[in-house]
Image (cartoon, rainbow, N blue to C red):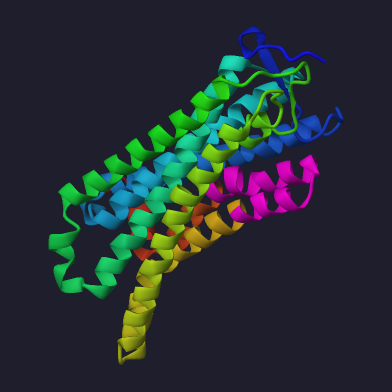
Amino acid sequence: MEPENDTRISEFLLLGFSEDPERQPILFGLFLSMYLITVLGNLLIILATISHSHLHTPMYFFLSNLSFSDICLVSTTVPKMLVNVKTHSKVISYAGCVTQMYFFVLFAVLDSFLLTVMAYDRFVAICHPLHYAVTVNPRLCGLLVLVSWIMSALDALLESLVVLWLSFCTDLEIPHFFCELNQVVHLACSDTFLNDMVMYFSAILLGGGSLAGIVYSYSKIVSSIRAISSAQGKYKAFSTCASHLSVVSLFYCTSLGVYLSSAATHNSHSSTTASVMYTVVTPMLNPFIYSLRNKDIKWALKQFFRGKK
């Protein structure tokens, strides 16, 4: 079969989870609920942080940016899936697919960078508390977030551009509920060596680098906590980073689990189901983790609902 040039491709088909008509209303209700909970939960974190001067600190500045990124991440994939389920359609345009890939990569990488920045913030706060106010100043916070955005946007742009050079065959069915980069690349008839190299390079340099930064920060944090003599002091120090550590564990364990399982098995349905964990479930759980384990957030949310500042 002769490959068709990608300039003549007008659409892809997203196979999603199930073709059973009886399951479509259940899927629609489930993902709509998860999407609304994710948006509402993260939006409340942002509003609580903005509304109360008590939370105008570097840690909550980074947290509000993470919440915004999570809202954008889930909004990149779920609304289109909901529309397709409601209209009984699997179609996504070629331009829409590439656009979805770009923004998904952007906000997934941004999440990784922000978690690394938050780990650095906790590292300075616990290991160098006397220099915290000087080191993690507003200018540095803004610069760290700006660099995270720029690096994420450039990586997403590079990975999306190399997809535009691919030629695709007539089989344009994506065994996923969104245009996942790896799935789209493997539909191509042309050589994907460059795409694979870009993806592996990005995963190792950006994903691996971010994870290494987090591991290094927490190794120093653990050493500092162990050096504290009182049990109360150790608990107080650990509690300041417990929520962040929980979110990091959830994000990296689910994302690594998805790609390790997809490498070990060729069951696309299992891979699609597993992807829900880090694309939908993790952004949904983050606000609960921070609000349930953080007294300042709980206090701010109570004050917010009471209309107080």
> Magenta-highlighted stretch: main secondary structure?
helix
Frontmost residue, 191 versus 89: 191
Q: Is residue 43 visible?
A: no
**Is residue 23 found left or right of 76 in the rendered image?**
right
Residue range of the region highlighted in magenta in the rendering: 256-283
**Is residue 266 within the magenta segment?**
yes
Up/down of 81 relative to 107, above or below: above
**Is residue 162 found left or right of 151 in the rendered image?**
right
Expressed as whole percent of the image width and height from the top left, the position of residue 192 reads 63, 31
Instruction: Name the quadrant containing residue 127.
Output: bottom left
**Is residue 25 found left or right of 153 in the rendered image?**
right
- Quadrant, the N terminus: top right
- As drawn, the residue found furthest toward the top would be 8
Frontmost residue, 291 versus 66: 66
- As drawn, the residue found furthest toward the left would be 134
Expressed as whole percent of the image width and height from the top left, the position of residue 190 reads 67, 23
Frontmost residue, 285 versus 157: 157
Up/down of 98 relative to 236, above or below: above
Expressed as whole percent of the image width and height from the top left, the position of residue 250 reads 55, 58
Q: Residue at x 36, y 39 (%)?
A: 151
Q: Residue at x 70, y 22 (%)?
A: 84
Q: Residue at x 12, y 61 (%)?
A: 134
Expressed as whole percent of the image width and height from the top left, the position of residue 164 reads 55, 20
**Is residue 65 found left or right of 73 in the rendered image?**
left
